Every structure is written in structure tokens, then in C-alpha cells.
Image (cartoon, rainbow, N blue to C red):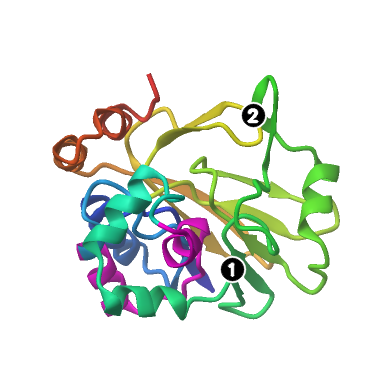
Amino acid sequence: MRLAVISDVHGNLPALDAVLTAIAEDGAELTVNLGDLLSGPVQPAETADRLIELGLPTVAGNHERQLLTFSEQRMGMVDRLTSSLIGARHRSWMASLPMTLSPAPGVLAFHGTPTDDLQYLLHTVTAAGAREATVDEVRSRLGEVSGYHLLLCGHTHVAGSLRLPGGPLIVNPGSVGWPAYTDDRPFEHEMAAGSPHARYALVDDGSGRWEVSLREVTYPWDKAAAFAEGFGRPDVAHALRTGRNS
């Protein structure tokens, strides 16, 4: 089976459309979406319309939870903006999304970890910044995942994979629509893809076990950045154009 995996679209419709075109050319049998769908200063409502129409197997990310449960005062800037632009139909759709799903036999999809939409799986954040997680750290975050041969996660916006010894292949496709960001939880750190490309993953079990190809797609990122500038977010515009935070 050939699966395409996308994550962290963050309302970037030009990037999403480019990735979907590439996926169609890949001949994927199914596309799985790992959450953080709309929150971003590009085209959140239009992205919601597109994703609802597509009906992809989709899990909720932390931003879906925040949009649905946080007060306006508690929301970050991009969630407040997105909340002001989306409608009741979009909210109802987000509320229907599960935290985890199994889109194919032996495959488990989630946003951060299976039980925490804010926890990084393949990275660890310390006072010194973000680094790749150790195998033991990854195992401790996964909990009980016996019976699964492929685990799909997002959230960090950085593409990567890890095959656990004697265990499943873990794949993070990177971000479709937001290639770099900074955060202060649990410590100040930055995550950056290093280039402005939209990213996704293609996974295939034709060899007898799951194998992954991490893909990058050129799209009109200047168009996306112009939206961000129009919404008063030059920092996001810079990240969209460069894949870097500074």
C-alpha cells in the first residue's frame, strides 16, 4: 500500500494545493492528515473548505483543540485570527476529528504523541534547545503501540523518521504550510526546516515492510508570505519565504 502523509498545513492553501498535486502524481492510494489544519495568517477559511471537501482521514492537532476550547484571551495571535475568519461549519468539522486513528491495518496516526497533542515525539527540548530524541525517550512517549508497524506523527514541522529496534517505523512528514517557528515551552527553542518548501511523506510497504520517502515541493511561497504580511505577521512571512526564523 502507498500512503501519502501530510501535517501542519496551518491554513496555507497555496502550499496545500501544490502538495496535493504532487501526491496525485505519486499515485498514493490514501492521504492521511495529521492535524494543525487552519491556524495561520494565510487562508484559514479557504483551507478549511478545501479539506472538508477532500474528506481525508484526519486527526486533530493542538491548534484544533485550542480553537475549540480556549477563550479569546487565552488564544495566541494566529488562533485568534483564525477564530475570527472561520465559521460554524468549520468548527463542527474540527470537533468531529479524533485524536488518533488507524487509517490502514497496522498504521496509527496522531499529531504529537498518541496521548498528548503538544508533546514532541522525535525531538526533545532542553534549556540548550531542541535535539533529536533518544530511542528510550521515544519509547517512553509512545506508550502501548504493539501491533502497529507504522506510526505517523507531526507537530514539530521538521521532517524525519526513526525505525525503532524490533519495532515500528515512525514518520514525521514535516509541515505543509509553515516551515519554521519558535516556542517557549518547555524552554525557548526554534524549529526550522531550513528552506521554504512544502513537505510531505510517501510511505510504501511494497518491499515487505514500511519504507519512507520524505518529499519537498516548490510552491508560490511569496504569495503565502504576502497574506501573512497583510495580516500583520512579517515574522511568519519571513519564515514562509526562507524556512528560517531569522
* Label drawn at residue 206: 1
239 horizontally vs 5: left or right: left
**Tag 1–tag 2 contact (CB < 8 Å):** no
| Magenta segment includes 56 | yes
Residue plotted at (54% across, 43% down): 156
Q: Position of residue 243 (x, y in %)?
A: 36, 30
212 horizontally vs 4: left or right: right
Q: Amino acid at mark 1?
A: Gly
Residue plotted at (69% across, 64% down): 114
Q: Nearer the viewer, residue 244 or 229?
A: 229
Query: Label 2's element?
Result: loop
Please state the total of marks drawn on the protein image. 2
What are the residue bounds of the magenta stretch? Answer: 46-71
Q: What quarter of the picture does the C terminus occupy?
A: top left
16 horizontally vs 155: left or right: left
Q: Nearer the viewer, residue 21 or 75?
A: 75
Query: Label 1's element?
Result: loop
First-in-chain label (1 vs 2): 2
Q: Position of residue 23 (x, y in %)?
A: 34, 62
Residue plotted at (81% across, 43% down): 137
Q: For the residue carrying disc 2, how many other residues have a C-alpha within 10 Å: few (<14), some (14-19), or many (20+)?
A: few
Prevailing secondary structure class for the magenta stretch in the rendered image: helix
Residue 181 shows up from this direction: yes
In the rendered image, which residue does mark 2 sit on? 187
Q: What quarter of the picture does the N terminus occupy?
A: bottom right
Compared with 44, 227 (above or below) is above
Q: Position of residue 203 (x, y in %)?
A: 54, 61
